Image (cartoon, grey):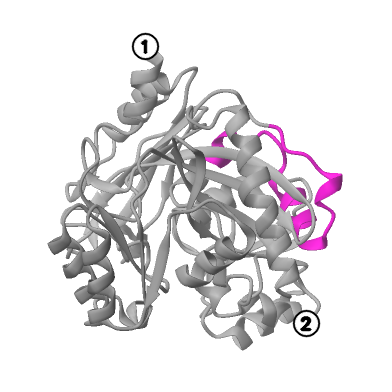
């Protein structure tokens, strides 16, 4: 098979690494990719925002299958454009991608189909949003409705924080994403990420993970795109997975089909496990980043047939096998992230990874032939182990061999699971 992967981040490097192991692959391309992805695929300088250019490349190379990594091209309708040419595509239509593209859309689906989630209201102006917040009290959650690269959510512990978040949205801090605001109840519990493939009718549960959104240790500081993750998430017991499928995933599949937007791709359900059970915080319509990195380290099955079955409507004919060993990834970010940071700082050396270890490239590039940091989140240093504590020890030992002066990381990734292991 000739495969094209769309994207350039750590998630895409993890997908490329895993896809490249498939014996079904004959030619593998990535657009635009990054230096890490370039170890597994031929990098092509196609502008992924130019859907016609992507379609033309697919025709030129006789591509059989396209895997779309990030959310923005999906929300913009890239999958629709390629399917119009008869291509098999992993990723939802623009209409189905609204589950991530609009927080309000997802909340409305939850309300219509009885999916457990926090109570909410949608607003298109600041005075009404603030009046509602005043009436509800804090803590409360304020979200920009549209895509804001993981940064449009404020968990406000005070009214002033909530009001400031509303001002940020309506004053353009998140561009068009903040034109509408969703205000929702604060859910108390433990967060978990749940992944499930869906072909429009059939669902194949994958695995669970736990992300660390806050920039500082002990889950302090402001939200980021994710500073590290581990899999599986102990809070997601077999009973909790079963309830998530029954109470959240299955009604969503039914609801999307009934709405005329059948969902094909991966559901990434951000959950809060509360006293009541699993409640939906949000949906993403692509693999998580950095959760994808730990999922791919644990997946024993060939990834390509799983993604292809999702695209072709034959998920009921495949299964996924997972390693019982936990995997953990630590994000190395540029100093200053998630605020302003210096770009193109030199990465002088990456360590040799042993079996069960991998350094994924998230925000890297080449400048005059030398590796540089081009993004906020730059490397995902990943390892497996017999326990989360062992995976953590291996990941940090590998990370300490990275030669990059402008990098920083959290030193406590996996702390909840490690505490549980001690108990």
Q: What is the number of the mark on residue 272?
A: none
Q: Nearer the viewer, residue 200 or 41?
A: 200
Question: Where does residue 140 sit, x and y in percent of width and height?
Answer: 28, 56
Q: What is the number of the mark on residue 85?
A: 2
Q: Is residue 216 above or below residue 386?
A: below
Question: Where does residue 65 sit, x and y in percent of width and height?
Answer: 74, 65
Q: Residue at x 54, y 38 (%)?
A: 208
Queried whether the magenta region covers residue 252, the answer comes back as no
Q: What is the number of the mark on residue 423?
A: 1
- Crowd band around label 1 with a 10 angstrom C-alpha radius: few (<14), some (14–19), many (20+): few
Q: Residue at x 57, y 41 (%)?
A: 296
**Residue located farthest toward the left when viewing the structure as drawn:** 160
Q: Nearer the viewer, residue 413 or 142?
A: 142
Question: Where does residue 223 sit, x and y in percent of width and height?
Answer: 27, 54
Q: Is residue 357 above or below residue 185?
A: above
Which mark is first along the chain, 2 or 1? 2
For the stretch drawn in magenta, the main secondary structure is helix
């Amino acid at each position: 098979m000739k495969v094209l992967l769309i994207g350039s981040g750590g998630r895409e490097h993890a997908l490329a690494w895993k896809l490249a192991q498939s014996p079904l692959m004959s030619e593998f391309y990535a657009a635009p990719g990054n230096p890490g992805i370039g170890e597994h695929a031929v990098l092509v300088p196609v502008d992924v925002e130019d859907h016609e250019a992507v379609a033309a490349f697919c025709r030129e190379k006789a591509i059989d299958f396209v895997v779309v990594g990030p959310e923005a091209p999906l929300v913009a309708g890239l999958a629709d454009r390629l399917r119009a040419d008869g291509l098999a595509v992993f990723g939802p239509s623009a209409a189905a991608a609204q589950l991530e593209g609009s927080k309000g859309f997802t909340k409305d689906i939850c309300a219509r189909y009885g999916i457990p989630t926090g109570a909410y209201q949608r607003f298109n102006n600041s005075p009404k949003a603030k009046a509602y917040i005043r009436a509800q009290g804090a803590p409360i959650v304020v979200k920009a409705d549209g895509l804001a690269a993981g940064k449009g959510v404020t968990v406000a512990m005070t009214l002033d924080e909530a009001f400031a978040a509303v001002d940020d949205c309506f004053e353009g801090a998140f561009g068009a994403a903040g034109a509408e605001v969703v205000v929702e109840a604060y859910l108390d519990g433990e967060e978990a990420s749940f992944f499930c493939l869906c072909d429009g009718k059939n669902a194949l549960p994958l695995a669970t993970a736990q992300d660390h959104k806050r920039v500082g240790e002990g889950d302090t500081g402001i939200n980021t795109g994710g500073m590290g993750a581990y899999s599986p998430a102990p809070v997601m017991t077999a009973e909790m997975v079963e309830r998530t499928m029954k109470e959240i995933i299955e009604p969503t599949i039914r609801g999307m089909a009934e709405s005329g937007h059948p969902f094909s791709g991966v559901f990434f359900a951000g959950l809060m496990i509360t006293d009541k059970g699993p409640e939906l915080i949000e949906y993403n319509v692509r693999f998580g980043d950095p959760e994808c990195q730990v999922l791919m380290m644990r997946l024993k099955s060939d990834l390509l047939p799983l993604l292809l079955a999702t695209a072709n409507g034959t998920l009921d004919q495949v299964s996924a096998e997972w390693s019982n060993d936990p995997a953990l990834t630590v994000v190395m970010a540029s100093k200053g992230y998630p605020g302003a940071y210096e770009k193109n700082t030199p990465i002088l050396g990456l360590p040799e990874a042993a079996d069960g270890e991998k350094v994924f490239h998230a925000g890297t590039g080449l400048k005059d032939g030398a590796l540089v940091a081009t993004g906020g989140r730059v490397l995902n240093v990943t390892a497996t182990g017999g326990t989360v504590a062992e995976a953590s020890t291996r990941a940090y030992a590998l990370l300490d061999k990275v030669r990059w002066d402008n990098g920083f990381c959290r030193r406590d990734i996996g702390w909840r699971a490690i505490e549980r292991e001690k108990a």
